[in-house]
Image (spheres, helix red, strand yellow):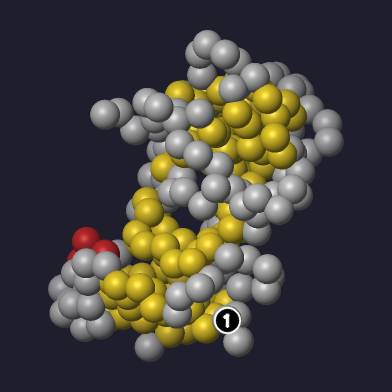
Amino acid sequence: GESVGLHLPTLSVQEGDNSIINCAYSNSASDYFIWYKQESGKGPQFIIDIRSNMDKRQGQRVTVLLNKTVKHLSLQIAATQPGDSAVYFCAENIGGAGGTSYGKLTFGQGTILTVHP
Amino acid sequence: NAGVMQNPRHLVRRRGQEARLRCSPMKGHSHVYWYRQLPEEGLKFMVYLQKENIIDESGMPKERFSAEFPKEGPSILRIQQVVRGDSAAYFCASSTLGDDTEAFFGQGTRLTVV
């Protein structure tokens, strides 16, 4: 299950289980959302993205769900592996002053995923 | 194709010194973004640059911080007169276009102010 740790929320799962990581965003004007994986000492690594005109998108072993009504984003990882252990961040694209969105991202707090063999 | 290259990976500075962080975007990328990450937190946007232009610096502290992306060479994030609170990981990301395209991140520079 999911619990709130001392600083970041944590999720511990067994290898082979499915993982669900949740994220709430605040800006209803956001139109582009990304999930990143960050391993210790490394930069964020792109996992999957979704635009606001979609509510679901699937990749390899990962699915992102977007619920604009409640401003909620989730990342589902199928058959979680020890190599999936990392901090996962959702990020939203707020866009520029001229109305053109670009890569200015607002990151969520992050969730620590630990996969036990 | 090399990814986004940042150097140095680790930088130690004494209070009052200057820190210079470098970022070479991926080949073909002309848009650069700098982010700062404090321990146990998400990344915070600092500045968005294109070649020779600062597009959005709304996340930059008003004093001591500056950024540039010259016509030739890497993008530079410069922190003058560093203080302990500047200790963080600084990440650079680059993309091909500004609009809704994936930004690739470098491995970051970890700045420690002693």
- Give above or below for A52 relative to B31: below
Q: How many marks?
A: 1
Give left or right: position of A55 versus B68.
left
Q: Position of residue B56 (x, y in %)?
A: 71, 39
Q: Position of residue B39 (x, y in %)?
A: 56, 53
Does residue B6 appear in the picture of this structure? no
Which residue is more in the foreground, A49 or A113?
A49
Does residue B54 appear in the picture of this structure? yes
Q: Residues within 10 Å of mark 1 (few under 14, many from 20)?
A: some
Residue farthest top in this picture: B72
Q: Position of residue B49 (x, y in %)?
A: 63, 31
- Give above or below for B50 relative to A33: above
Residue farthest right in this picture: B62
Q: Chain of mark 1?
A: A
Which residue is more in the foreground, B24 or A100?
A100
Residue in the image at 73% along x and 38% along y: B57
Give left or right: position of B32 versus A39.
right
Give left or right: position of B14 versus A68.
right
Q: Position of residue B95 (x, y in %)?
A: 47, 39
- Give above or below for B101 relative to A112: above
Quadrant in which the C terminus of chain B is drawn: top right
Residue in the image at 69% along x and 49% along y: A96
Residue in the image at 71% along x and 53% along y: A99
Quadrant in which the N terminus of chain B is drawn: top left
- Specify the amino acid type for callout 1: Lys
Quarter of the rendering containing residue A58: bottom left
Label 1: state its secondary structure. Answer: loop
Q: Which residue is mark 1?
A: A68
Residue in the image at 59% along x and 58% along y: A93
Which residue is more in the foreground, A34 or B41?
A34
